[in-house]
Image (cartoon, rainbow, N blue to C red):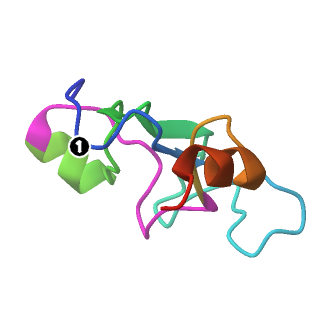
Amino acid sequence: MDKKIFPNFFNLTQKPHIAKAMGSLPFDSEGVATNDRVFVENGVLQSYLLSSYGARRLGLNTTGNCGGVQNLLVSHSDNDLFELLKKMGTG
């Protein structure tokens, strides 16, 4: 936790309450309420995916992820496609 595991531009978040999205759930498989969660921010690990069982074994709290992640979003830096292509030059 709190260690750099990806490049600075990498972010990984969960948004389980997006209206009409296929992965939206108010509760996980154990009945625990789901929440927006940041797993990786600017390449740094911020949170784990934990069911009640896994959390208990690690001495932590469940993250409401029994059964998996809901609406996983991978994002990058603030640069859009054209800015990234400009930075690349000829590649």
Q: Is residue 18 above or below residue 42?
A: below
Q: Which residues are magenta?
A: 58-72
Q: How far across and down, in percent of the image, does residue 18 sit?
A: 81, 55
**Foreground pick, 3 / 20:** 3
Residue 48 visible in the shown view: yes
Position of 57 with respect to 85 (left or right) is left
74 in relation to 10, above or below: below
Mark 1: which secondary structure? helix
Q: Residue at x 58, y 43 (%)?
A: 87
Answer with left or right where residue 25 lies relative to residue 51.
Answer: right
Pick the quarter of the image with the N terminus.
top left
Residue closest to the far top: 2
- Res. 15 in view: no
Q: Residues within 10 Å of mark 1 (few under 14, many from 20)?
A: some
Q: Residue furthest right?
A: 19
Q: Is residue 66 magenta?
A: yes
Mark 1 residue type: Ala
User: How far from the left and from the top, in percent, is residue 75?
Assistant: 59, 49
Residue at position x 71%, y 44% in the image: 83
Given residues 11 and 86, the one toward you in this image is 86
State the residue lying farthest toward the bottom. Answer: 22
User: What kind of secondary structure does the magenta stretch mostly adopt?
Assistant: loop
Residue topped by disc 1: 55
Which x, y percent locates residue 81?
Answer: 72, 55
User: Residue 67 falls in which quadrant of the image?
Assistant: bottom left
Q: Viewed as shown, does residue 46 lie left or right of 23? A: left
Q: Which residue occupies 76% across, 52% down?
A: 82
Give the quarter of the image for residue 77: top right
Q: Say if 16 sits above or below 44 in the image.
A: below
Where residue 23 sits, quadrant-wise, is bottom right
What residue lies at 14% left-to-right and 32% top-to-bottom? 59
